[in-house]
Image (cartoon, rainbow, N blue to C red):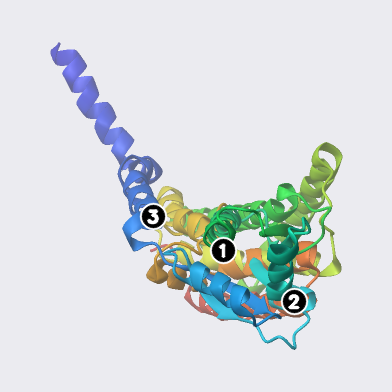
């Protein structure tokens, strides 16, 4: 028994010396509790902003707006009647919007007077990949049922139809794939470079490089070029598999390749910067996990954050992966190159700042 106890102690010490093992044993479950607890804490849920364009202005359209606004789920944001809603949704990359057409009230009054069957219809534009889309669809449906009941004692007068904010041919996989690509770019670039930089310093490889004519910025650029090449290949492979297996309709645009290069530049720089504070490769892995896992779940790659607490949405907007995912979705799915270019610019600016910082802080000497 004493031998077993001694072996447990010895193995335990050896196991816990591994920084990655310690991270997944203690830090990882705590991070998951904190992140998902904040996301799904129902008493702290934020209302979803629901853009609405009211081209009618009559009694029943105003009653519908009041009914929607009285829920605890949505907060109405009006869109000017002068806007072309389909174009507006595309330019603003909106996840959802409601159109109340002209003569909505007049059509309801005619139905009540003539017992007609041609129901008054509103249109819900939405992104079916968003969990909030189903929520808004349910809220709109129940609001119309409520109005039907109070207006004509449950006789159907009003209904709605759904239009994709992109193209009717797009499916969930088309909206999901940019998040998959974003996670792939981040993990391969950031995790690898954090461990490489830490290992090079701790094992003396960096000192050997210092004796050569290779400059630090050249070494950094070579790593960025390498990851750009292999992750571009990964993007193409992911796209081909999605196309062959699921009939992927999202488009590989020139901007999508630009995002791969910009994302690699950004996250390789993040990895280099993290590598300057890690003592060895194991510690580098733990540091990368501590940064990477929250970024995965708070960037909107796996699920939307519209109904999470406002402070959590603020954190999401401070994460570079959020802008990478949004920009890739803008160009591949929505065809909104204006918004995609803005997100690309943000990714590049943050990348430049971090690259300069990494170049200055990265030491060729062992600490």
Q: Position of residue 89 (x, y in %)?
A: 72, 74
Of residues 164 and 115, the one drawn nearer to the viewer in this rendering: 115
Q: In the depicted view, which residue is nearer to us: 131 or 260?
A: 131
Decide which of tag 2 and tag 1 comes sooner along the chain: 2
Residue marked by disc 3: 35
Q: Earlier in the sequence, mark 3 or mark 1?
A: 3
Query: Secondary structure under badge 3?
Result: helix
Q: Position of residue 358 (x, y in %)?
A: 53, 73
Q: Which circle, 2 or 1, is nearer the viewer?
A: 1
Q: Which residue is mark 1?
A: 151
Q: Is residue 216 visible?
A: yes
Please provide percent x and percent y for residue 54: 66, 79
Taking 57 as reference, is 314 above or below it?
above
Position of the N terminus by quadrant: top left
Identify the residue at image location x=46%, y=69%.
Answer: 313
Q: Which mark is residue 103?
A: 2
Q: Residue furthest top?
A: 1
**Residue drawn at x 37%, y 46% as measured from the top left:** 28
Which element type, helix, strand or loop, lies under badge 2?
loop
322 horizontally vs 55: left or right:
left
Task: Say if 51 sits above or below 283 in the image.
Answer: below
- Of tags 3 and 1, the one toward the viewer is 1
Q: Which mark is residue 101?
A: none
For the residues bearing labels 2 and 3, Cβ distance under 8 angstroms: no
Residue located at (37% from left, 40% from top): 21
């Amino acid at each position: 028994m004493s031998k077993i106890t001694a072996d447990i102690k010895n193995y335990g010490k050896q196991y816990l010396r591994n920084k990655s093992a310690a991270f997944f044993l203690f830090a990882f479950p705590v991070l998951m509790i904190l992140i998902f607890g904040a996301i799904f804490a129902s008493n702290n849920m934020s209302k979803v902003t629901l853009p609405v364009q009211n081209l009618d202005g009559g009694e029943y359209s105003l009653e519908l707006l009041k009914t929607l606004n009285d829920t605890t789920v949505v907060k109405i944001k009006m869109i000017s009647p002068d806007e072309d809603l389909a174009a507006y949704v595309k330019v603003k990359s909106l996840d959802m919007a409601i159109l109340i057409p002209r003569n909505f009230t007049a059509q309801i009054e005619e139905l009540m007077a003539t017992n007609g069957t041609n129901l008054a219809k509103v249109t819900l534009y939405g992104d079916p990949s968003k969990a909030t889309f189903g929520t808004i669809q349910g809220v709109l449906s129940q609001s119309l049922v409520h109005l039907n009941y109070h207006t004509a004692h449950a006789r159907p007068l009003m209904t709605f139809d759904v239009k994709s904010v992109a193209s009717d041919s797009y499916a969930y996989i088309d909206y999901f794939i940019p998040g998959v690509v974003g996670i792939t770019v981040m993990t391969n670039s950031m995790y690898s470079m954090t461990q490489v930089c830490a290992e090079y310093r701790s094992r003396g490889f960096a000192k050997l490089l210092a004796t050569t004519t290779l400059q630090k910025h050249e070494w950094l650029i070579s790593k960025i070029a390498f990851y750009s090449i292999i992750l571009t290949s990964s993007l193409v492979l992911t796209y081909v598999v999605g196309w062959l297996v699921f009939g992927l309709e999202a488009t590989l645009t020139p901007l999508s390749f630009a995002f791969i290069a910009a994302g690699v530049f950004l996250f390789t720089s993040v990895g280099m910067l993290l590598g300057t504070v890690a003592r060895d490769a194991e510690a580098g892995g733990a540091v990368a996990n501590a940064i990477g896992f929250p970024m995965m779940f708070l960037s909107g790659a796996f699920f939307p954050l519209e109904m999470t607490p406002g402070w959590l949405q603020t954190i999401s907007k401070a994460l570079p992966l959020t802008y990478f995912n949004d920009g890739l979705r803008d160009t591949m799915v929505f065809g909104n190159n204006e918004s995609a270019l803005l997100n690309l610019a943000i990714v590049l600016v943050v990348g430049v700042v971090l690259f300069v910082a990494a170049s200055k802080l990265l030491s060729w000497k062992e600490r």
